[in-house]
Amino acid sequence: MWRLPSLTFEGRPLGVPLCGDSAGAVEVVRALVRSIGCAPVDGGPLERAELLEAMTAFAIGLWAGGADVRSMYPTVA
């Protein structure tokens, strides 16, 4: 990711899902995500992190197989 010429996809900032139980910690990470030009996306409490990781692995597998997974996920504003 750090070697990408731009942290955008089709002209929009990359969305970075965040899960956490500490509002303060999540806010620090939100600021870090924004500082590199990406868009933080609220993923809910930390207990959802496992689901987020599984969803990501599933989407990457579909993408690697030639599917266009963009239609499965909403656009992040």
Image (cartoon, rainbow, N blue to C red):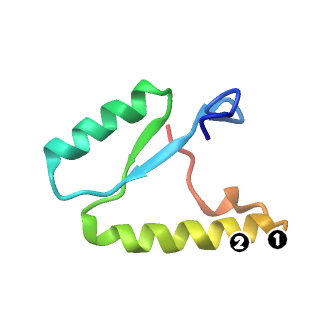
At horizontal 42% and vertical 73% (from top left) the residue drawn is 51
Q: Which corner quadrant of the image does residue 58 belong to?
A: bottom right
Measured as percent of width and height from the top left, residue 4 is found at 68, 33
Circle 2 crowding by C-alpha within 10 Å: few under 14, some 14–19, many from 20:
few
User: Please, what secondary structure does the residue beneath circle 2 have?
Assistant: helix
Circle 1 crowding by C-alpha within 10 Å: few under 14, some 14–19, many from 20:
few
Look at the picture and state if 8 lies above or below 74.
above
Whether pointer 2 and pointer 1 mark residues with C-beta atoms closer than 8 Å, the reply is yes
In which quadrant of the rendered image does the N terminus lie? top right
Location of mark 1 (residue): 65
Q: Is residue 2 left or right of residue 42?
A: right
Mark drawn on residue 61: 2
Q: Which corner quadrant of the image does residue 32 belong to?
A: top left
Q: Amino acid at mark 1?
A: Gly
Measured as percent of width and height from the top left, residue 22 is found at 15, 52
Q: Amino acid at mark 2?
A: Gly
